[in-house]
Image (tube, rainbow, N blue to C red):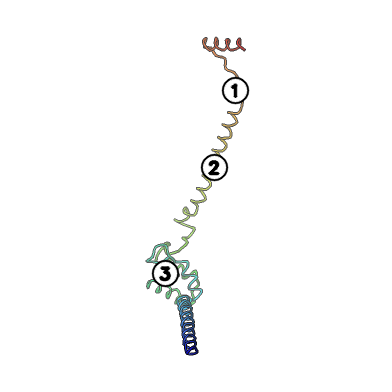
């Protein structure tokens, strides 16, 4: 009787271990399956990273799962397969959809001031901070110099000062 309960206990432990192993294998397989998104062609991906998604604001084409983006990626691949360079593909999309299709706008033409604005703002800030510091240090230097005694023409103040001198 004891022996039969040991066998049953051993069998249930074995079944529990097998269930645990099956669970671990299932979870690890499921994670690797969802983590293994087929990698696109490297050149296509690199170009798609430089383009904006036409439907999702602020998202690049390479990371967007929409159907439109899939079509654009297919167009990139087709143009690369036809022998076009990466710059020619980018120029094609820019000519067709305008400069806003690019993740990084061109540094010429209408967008040139946008690239110069942060530099100009930093220079204005630094010059302004320098002027404020110069004026503050100048004001502090003037305040630190001893003031000469002011001769008073008021008879009451003169009398008061004479009285203070006599009492000392």
Asked if the residues shown at circle 2 and circle 1 are in contact, with their CB atoms under 8 angstroms apart, the answer is no
Q: Return the residue found at the far front.
A: 1
User: Relative to residue 159, is residue 127 depicted above or below?
Assistant: below
Q: Which of the two discs, 2 and 1, labels the residue nearer the N terminus?
A: 2
Q: Which residue is mark 1?
A: 147
Dot 3 lies on which element?
A: loop
Report crowding for label 1: few under 14, some 14 to 19, many 20 or more residues within 10 A (C-alpha).
few
Is residue 40 visible in the rendered structure shown here?
no
Dot 1 lies on which element?
A: loop
User: Relative to residue 152, is residue 109 depicted above or below?
Assistant: below
Q: Which of the two discs, 3 and 1, labels the residue nearer the N terminus?
A: 3
Q: CA distance from mark 2 to mark 1?
A: 32 Å
Dot 2 lies on which element?
A: helix
Q: Nearer the viewer, residue 55 or 96?
A: 55
User: Relative to residue 133, is residue 14 depicted above or below?
Assistant: below
Q: Which of the two discs, 2 and 3, labels the residue nearer the N terminus?
A: 3
Q: Nearer the viewer, residue 147 or 46?
A: 147
Q: Nearer the viewer, residue 166 or 148?
A: 166
* Mark number, residue 127: 2
């Amino acid at each position: 009787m004891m022996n039969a309960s040991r066998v049953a206990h051993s069998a249930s432990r074995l079944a529990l271990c097998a269930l645990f192993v099956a669970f671990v294998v299932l979870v690890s397989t499921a994670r690797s399956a969802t983590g293994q998104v087929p990698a696109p062609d490297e050149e296509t991906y690199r170009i798609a990273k430089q383009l904006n998604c036409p439907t999702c604001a602020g998202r690049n084409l390479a990371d967007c799962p929409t159907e439109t983006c899939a079509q654009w990626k297919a167009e990139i691949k087709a143009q690369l397969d036809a022998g076009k360079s990466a710059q020619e593909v980018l120029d094609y999309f820019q000519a067709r959809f305008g400069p806003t299709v690019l993740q990084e706008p061109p540094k010429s033409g209408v967008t040139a001031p946008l690239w110069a604005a942060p530099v100009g703002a930093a220079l204005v800030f630094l010059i302004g901070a320098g002027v404020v510091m110069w004026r503050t240090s100048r004001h502090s230097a003037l305040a630190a110099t001893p003031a000469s005694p002011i001769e008073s023409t008021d008879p009451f103040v003169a009398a008061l000062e004479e009285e203070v001198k006599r009492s000392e």
